[in-house]
Amino acid sequence: MTSVTGHADTQHPLSSSEVARIKADFEILEHPINGTDLVYLDSGATSQKPRCVYEAEQHYYETANAAVHRGAHSLAVEATELFEQARETVASFIGARSNEVVWTSNATEALNLISYSLSNASAGLGGSAAERFRLTRGDEILVTELEHHANLIPWQELAFRTGATLRYVPVTEDGALRYDLLDELVTESTKLIAFTHVSNVLGTITDVERFVQAARRVGALTVLDGCQSVPHLPVDVKALDIDFMAFSGHKMLGPTGIGALYGRAELLDAMPPFLTGGSMITVVDMEHAEYLPSPQRFEAGTQRIAQAHSLATAASYLDEIGMERIAAWEEHLGTLLLEGLSQLDGVRVFGPTDAPRIGTVPFEVMGVHPHDVGQYLDSRGIAVRVGHHCAQPLHRALGVTATTRASTYLYNTEEDVAALIAAVGSVREYFGV
Amino acid sequence: MNELDQLYQQVILDHAKRRVGSPLVEPAAAAQGESHQHNPICGDQIRVRVGLDEQNVFTSVSWEGEGCSISMASASVLSEMLPGMGRDQFLTTLDAFREMMRSKGTATPDEEVLEDAAAFVGVSKFPARVKCAMLAWVAAEAAMFGASS
Ligand SMILES: Cc1ncc(COP(=O)(O)O)c(C=O)c1O
């Protein structure tokens, strides 16, 4: 594997000078935007990539490109090896075994994969092994009001297809999850609980254990949306004791076009497939096909080989720096953001004040629409996200249609945060409010 | 003027605050129509109501909406321009506005035709904002075509 960082002192907290060295691995952060230095505070949407990540992809095409799991020639063997090594690297990054990681296009596809496998099971596919995945009228699926649309709509659709009922854990007007309602909401009818590990809008970290305990009490399956946690926090699926987890490569320094589904091996092996076709079968005749065990069972067709290799390089890069240290650095930046923004006149920060957060902070500048705030910040070289961030129900609960969101990553400096706070401080004057 | 100041010309910032034509009123007109438009990217939305007389001349325009200064100012400017305008003249003006919006900053707007709406030329340099500027115009067009007595 092409390596990587040389930021190997994993004991101490990240220092500003180390972050400056990390930042230098990201070519794009050195290019000025609108005549000033780029301050990239939109990693919640997608992260930037260090050189080693796209060099790995290029290296793959230059030295190893071939179709995997078929053909006996040397390149095919080499490509298969890299592909499966990549799976091992990413699996170990989240504490899973390698047959428990299925490649998908992104987290959205991973969540849809579960949703469609469950409706296939509900339609009677998968035989007796798939019994526990069957949903029917009277069964319940539980989500939360915090969810990204990607972890809401696939469950709405599953409910429509199976006759099950969708329920949700509401949030307070601050956006705090109503854990106090969990016991009431999780009943013998609850078959699946899907919830986010970290809110993509508020940056707040969910108490996973409370959900898992509630699910275990009634034997419900758990699906964790790891999109905003896997890139920013140490995540160990076995310690979290969840059944499934979805995440995306592009938010964790990896390339676009690849994400993954984690599932407990015994569950994945029993679930009927979603996409079918080549590469996922054992024996096929004109009437039937038999399917490989997981993960191949869920990987129909030619896979994202270069992307898998490149994503594994990203995971190794993060690992070498250390997820604990990255999380601590981002917590530090998040605190600076929260404090700095809260102190500005006419600026309101969203989210509960007592919940643990990653470096993601949504806010509102009174009297100025988020779109205008984002435009003004862009003119100063600062990239943030504005809008509903694919979480309309949460915004409704917060009483707004849109927010401005700053989100950090390991390459952000204290200066980036200071630049944002200074710029936000001059928004109202510019717009004359 | 830098690009940001061209985008947020004073006329636009003023209209965004004044919101001419808002809130909605019940038009006393021969024909009336209404349209609700939504910008799914940022959640901006607007409801425009128009009244036309027997000669297809706009007698009233009113709206309510929520959105950024560009979309709100655009609705306000349109509300100032429309009353007294005939249906065909509106369509010609709409074409000119749309063409300016597609120009990526290269158009020299015809102020005879576009009046205050010419101030939106700066928006055309920001493709992500064109939809904001168009929202009220598209709503007015749909309301007009849907108008009945
Ligand atoms: C919490 C959360 N879930 C799901 C997604 C969907 O990710 P993707 O668009 O990569 O499938 C995102 C990304 O926007 C997210 O932040």
Image (spheres, helix red, strand yellow):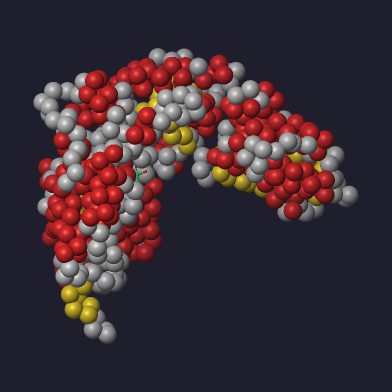
Give me the residue at 25% from left, 47% from top.
Answer: A56
Is residue A66 visible in the rendered structure shown here? yes
State which quarter of the image contains the N terminus of chain B: top right
Residue furthest front as drawn: A62
Q: Quadrant of ligand 1?
A: top left
Residue furthest bottom as drawn: A286
- Nearer to us in this view, B63 or A142: B63
- Nearer to us in this view, A56 or A208: A56
User: Can you tell which quarter of the image residue B29 is in?
Assistant: top right
User: Can you tell which quarter of the image residue A175 is in?
Assistant: top left
- Residue B47 locus on image (x, y percent): 65, 42
Is residue A165 visible in the rendered structure shown here? no
Vertical relation: A61 (above or below) A351: below
Residue furthest right as drawn: B55
- Nearer to us in this view, A209 or A1: A1
Give me the residue at 62% from left, 35% from top.
Answer: B123
- Residue A242 locus on image (x, y percent): 17, 48
- Residue A76 locus on image (x, y percent): 19, 64
User: Can you tell which quarter of the image residue A46 is in?
Assistant: top left
